Amino acid sequence: MLPLGTGLLLTHPDRSPPQSADELLDALASTFSQVRVGDPFSDQTQMGPLAAERQRDRVEAYIAKGIAEGATLATGGGRPQDLDRGWYIEPTVFGNVDNHSVIAQEEIFGPVLSVIPAGDEDEAVRIANDTIYELNASVFTSDVNRARQVAARLRSGTVGHNAMRTDFGVSFGGFKQSGIGREGVHEGLHPFLEVKFMILQGPPDGYEGTAA
C-alpha cells in the first residue's frame, strides 16, 4: 500500500490493528525493506521521492516522534543511502504502537505504517474507530461474510476488502474530520440541487390516486 504515491494519498490506511501483530509486523518489515526506492521514471522503481524537502522533514519528524514515544522501528526510518539527490525516505514500519500516540492519531502523508496490537475483533474495531479521520479503511480476511460484518462496524466513508479499494462508480467522502458530504455519482449532486415543495389542498390533474 505505502509505495503507491509514496504514502501521499488521503485514502491510505496507516493504522493496522491485527490479532497476530508480531507475525504481521515481521511480514510487513520483510516486504517493505525490499521495496525498490528510486527514480520515479525508472521501470524498476516501486516508490519514488516525496513531493518536497519540507514534506520529507515533516515525515522525518514524525518518525523521530514515534521512536521517542516508544514504538518499535521494524524497518526503514531513514534516507536511502544510495540516493543523495531528491526527497527520498525509506518505507517505514512501526510496531507496538500506542493508539493514542502521535504517529497513530495524526496524518503523516508519507510511507509510514503503524501496527497497533489488538486482543480481539471488538478491540480492533474500537481502535480503528478511535480516530478523528475516517476516509478509507480496509478489512483483511478470507471470510467475505466476516468482512461484511466488520466493515459495517467501521466508521469510514469507504471500506475495502483485502486491499485499499475505491471505485469511480461510488461516491467519495468520509466521516468526522475527513469531510462533510460526498463527491461523485448521485450523492455528489445533492449539494447542487434545490428542493421545492408545493402543498396543495387536493391532487391536481394526473395525480389522482397517488400517495399524499
Image (cartoon, rainbow, N blue to C red):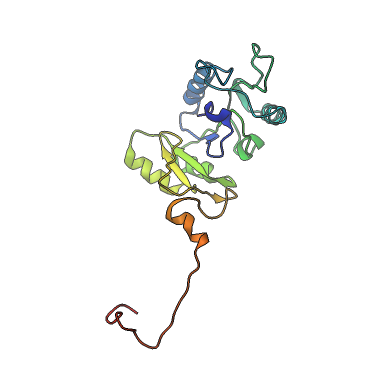
Q: Where is residue 137 in the image (x, y as percent from the top left)?
A: 48, 40
Question: Which residue is at the front of the view, 46 or 66?
Answer: 46
Question: Which residue is at the front of the view, 40 or 163?
Answer: 40
Q: Does 165 appear above or below 79?
A: below
Image position of 181 (left or right of 140): right
Q: Which residue lies furthest to the bottom in this view?
A: 201
Q: In which quarter of the image is residue 143?
A: top left
Image position of 115 (left or right of 145): right
Question: Which residue is at the front of the view, 185 or 212?
Answer: 185
Residue, x 36% and y 87% (percent of image)?
Answer: 202
Q: Position of residue 56 (x, y in %)?
A: 68, 27
Q: Does 164 appear above or below 75?
A: below
Q: Does 105 appear above or below 90?
A: below
Q: Does 39 appear above or below 132?
A: above
- The quarter in which the C terminus is drawn is bottom left
Q: In which quarter of the image is residue 54?
A: top right
Q: Residue furthest front?
A: 205
Is residue 113 visible in the rendered image? The answer is: no
How many badges with numbers are in the image? Answer: 0
Q: Where is residue 8 in the image (x, y as percent from the top left)?
A: 59, 33
Q: Which residue lies furthest to the top in this view?
A: 82
Q: Position of residue 176 (x, y in %)?
A: 57, 51
Is residue 161 visible in the rendered image? The answer is: yes
Q: In which quarter of the image is residue 100?
A: top right
